[in-house]
Each structure stands twice: as structure tokens, then as C-alpha cells.
Amino acid sequence: MDYRHIPDPNDGVDDRAQWSVLVGCTCADQHLYNLRLHRFRVTSSGRVTGHSNDLLEPFFTVHPEDKDNTVYAEATAALAPGGRRLDVICTHYPPPHLVCPDKLDMPPKAVAVDLVNKSTSLLAPLPFLDGSHYAVSAHGELWAPAVLTERSEEMSSWRLIVHRLDEGGNGWDEVASHHSPGRMKPVNQYIFTWLPGYAVIDDKFILLSLADGTFFCFNCSTGSLTRVRTTDKASKYECIYGMAVHVQEDGAIYFIGGTTLFAYKYSPEEEDAPLEPPVMVDMLWPYYNEGCGYIVQLVGRMLCAVWINMYKACGCAARHAMITTFRISSVAKSDGEGSPVYGVEVLHSTCRRVDMVRDQTYPYNHYDTFATLQ
Ligand SMILES: [Zn+2]
């Protein structure tokens, strides 16, 4: 059942589709079914076009066209300025039935997808083999922040590195690096990646959220990478998952954890105040660990969040994308101290079915992933 709180199109409101949102899912096991991009549209009033339970429109499939028939197991994506090109970084390996251990050492591939012509071109592969990484578009360039862990018999250590794609797309330059001796301890057992998420702030800074609950801020114009000061309330911090949204009007960063919308109040320019733990804004859907969700900005305080039941099958065996468009409100506390009070005004909440590659006999029902929302 849809929930709608938007003006009636019959009242002369412009109800034409204004934004296209891409939902990217990967499938690790199936050659040629790797990163699949689906699309839906949103009107200027926040209405998701189409009808409840429709199939999400398949848009384009990105697959490795190589003689080794590798598969794209995971992917992250970044929309280039102008929205015509989508840059994608994929980890890839041979199909499971062909895996031989020496072939697993393949550097992540980078692909530019032309969203108008629906064509792809290869960019230089990343200059490392294994690591937790993102494709990030900021300051007119493509960046690849990554956490690489190094293991030896005596100790473990990790490095946070930021690479930038060079002008011709033929190579990656290492722009910044931070080395930390010692093991990285994830803040909780549900974190499977060393670099769970990030946020781009004012098109100049990239806030990086690490699995151990720490944060780093990368300045795209100076190339500096600095640890963000936090308070002593370590257990109260939440990792950012995927690409968070920075809303300039609020000076806040919004992201989905489980099905909850969280907000960090953060400004890279204010160095005297430490980053406070996030505020829980609202729960967007009546689920939690059954799936995963991401968020994108439509315009200003108008955001769109999508959650898909990736980890638990529904009785009807379909994957359902719960799509919610909403507007953020924030009001300063009456005493003017601390974080403001945030609220959510839902505009449209609806669901669509997602065409996934699924093997009904597979016990965990979990070999495809909700990879990206753009
Ligand atoms: Zn169902």
C-alpha cells in the first residue's frame, strides 16, 4: 500500500518526472548477470512514478567482457558531474566453478558507463589487489579511497589510501595515505568491510567512515587526509553505510543504518569542535536486518531512500524495493545548545519488485547484493 502526502496532480502541480534514480545490484555467481542497473523516476513533488508492486525498470547491465569470463562480485559507483557518466569500480574474480587460487589476485576494475548511449569503456584498474574501496565523484574528479590491510606473522596493520584517476583515465595517482600499525577492530559484528561508507561535503571534502568507528576527512583541493576528532563516547558512533548525503542547509550528513535514518552534524571547516555521535532521526520502514538501504539527495532537503530485502526472502520469493521520498526538517533546540531536532516528512512511500538472479535452492538466499544507489 502506498503512502502519499503530495499535492494532487489535478491541482495544476507539475507532475512530470524530474529525477532518475539508479538502483545497482551485483550477482557474484553468474557470469553476464553482474552489475545490473535498474531505474525509477521521481517527479518534482516527490512522487515515484509507476505503481506499487511494478517491476523496477531494468536499465543496463555492466559485465566484464574478458576472455577469463570473470564475474563482478561487488561494485561501487559514482555519478560524474552532469549525470551523463557513471564511474564504477568492481572487484572481480573467475566464476566459482573455475576458481583457482592464483587467479584470485586480480586488481579491482574501473569502468565508465555512458548512461545516454548505454555503453561502457574501461578505465585503468586500481593499483592494488585487495581492499575495501569506493568510487567517489568530487571536485570534478574520480577518487578511490581504500583501506588495505597488511598481514604478517607478528602483526597486522592497515593503510587508508586515496587514489585519483589521472586525466586520460589511464592510471591512478596516490594522493594521500595514512598508515596505522595494529589490527583494525570493527565496532560491531555486522560490519564486513573496512571502509563501510563516506560522504562528499561541499564538493570538496570526502568524509571517510572506517569500520572501527573512526573518521577521516580528505580535502580534494589540498590532498590532505586528517583524522576527525571524536568525543570519548566511542560506543555511540555509527558507521556510515554507502554514500551518505550532505545537506548544506542543515550542515548535516544523513545515512541509513538498518532501516533508521541517522544524521551527523559535521563541518570540515570547524576544527575546534569534535564530531558528536549521530542523532537517530526516524525509522523509515518496519524492518531491520532483513535487508539493506541507501539514500540519495534529489534536491536540497528532499531525499530518497531505498531498502531491499536482500538477506531474507519474502513469502512470494520476490525481492522488494521499498522506496521512500521525504523532506528533512531541522529545528534548533529551544536552548540553542547541542544538535538540532530533526524530523522527516514523508512525501511518497511505495514498493517495487526487483528482478534478481536467484537460485531458489541456495540456502542463504544471499549471493546477490544491493550495491549502489545513485
Ligand atoms: Zn513478497
Image: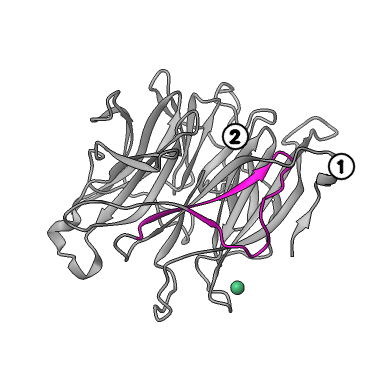
Q: Position of residue 77 (x, y in %)?
A: 42, 43
Q: Residue furthest toward the top?
A: 222
Q: In the rendered structure, does residue 203 fall within the stretch colored magenta?
A: no
Q: Quadrant of residue 160?
A: top left
Relative placement, left or right, of 3 versus 17 is right
Indicate the secondary structure of the residue bearing disc 2.
strand
Residue name at image x 85 percent, y 34 percent:
334
Q: Are marks 2 and 1 in contact (CB under 8 Å)?
A: no
**Which quarter is ligand 1 in?**
bottom right
Image height check: is 109 above or below 366?
above
Give the distance between the C-alpha atoms of the residues marked 2 and 1, in whole angstroms: 32 Å
Q: Quadrant of residue 9?
A: top right
Q: Residue furthest toward the bottom?
A: 361
Q: Position of residue 120 (x, y in %)?
A: 33, 42
Residue 118 visible in image: yes
Q: Which residue has dot 2 on it?
A: 246
Q: Which residue has dot 1 on it?
A: 11
Image height check: is 353 above or below 40?
below
The three-letter code of the residue at mark 1 reads Asp
Scheme of colours in the image:
one colour
* Mark number displayed over residue 190: none
The three-letter code of the residue at mark 2 reads His
Pointer 2 residue Cβ closer than 8 Å to ligand 1: no
Task: Work out whether residue 170 or residue 10 is closer to the camera in this orientation and state it.
Answer: 10
Indicate the secondary structure of the residue bearing disc 1.
helix
Residue 194 visible in image: no
Magenta residues span: 33-58
Question: Dividing the image into 4 quarters, which one contains the N terminus?
Answer: bottom right
